[in-house]
Structure formats: structure tokens, C-alpha cells
Amino acid sequence: MNRTILITGGAGFIGSHVVRLFVNKYPEYKIVNADNLTYAGNLGNLTDIGNKPNYLFRKIDI
């Protein structure tokens, strides 16, 4: 994994679909999901990819 893709808001409805697409389409890239988990963020949207080796979640407010 020599490249990293940062996705902000990846726990929301649209963001979770983008994160899932990138994690599955680019297994050689590290996909970082940065979300503050406010009203729209729900990690339950991403339970199917939570254990993938190229996926990383960080709860942050940027």
C-alpha cells in the first residue's frame, strides 16, 4: 500500500457508499475514513468493511 485516500464524512449515507466502493475497488490503497459521527454519521453503515486490512476509521472533527 503506497497510496492513501482520505474520505471525510464516510460514515454518512452517501459517504459510506463511497468508502465501500473505494475499499473494494482499490485493495492496494489505504482508505482512511474521517468522520465526527454527528447526526448523520453511523458506523453501522460500514460493518461489512470494518475488518478489511486497507480500511481505517478515525473519529475526528476537521
Image: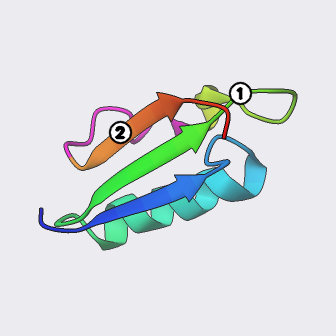
**42 to the left or right of 46:** right
Residue 24 location, x and y as percent?
34, 63
| Amino acid type at image mark 1 | Leu
The residue under label 2 is 56
Q: Which residue is mark 1?
A: 37
Residue 7 in percent (x, y) is at 54, 57
Q: Residue furthest right?
A: 39
The answer to which quarter of the image holds residue 3 is: bottom left
Within the magenta stretch, is there residue 32? no
First to last magenta residue range: 46-53
Q: Amino acid at mark 2?
A: Leu
Residue 49 or residue 59, whichever sits in front: 59
Residue nearer the viewer, 40 or 4: 4
Secondary structure beneath label 1: loop
Q: Residue at x 61, y 59 (%)?
A: 17
Residue closest to the eye, 36 or 54: 36
Q: x, y percentage for residue 45? A: 62, 37
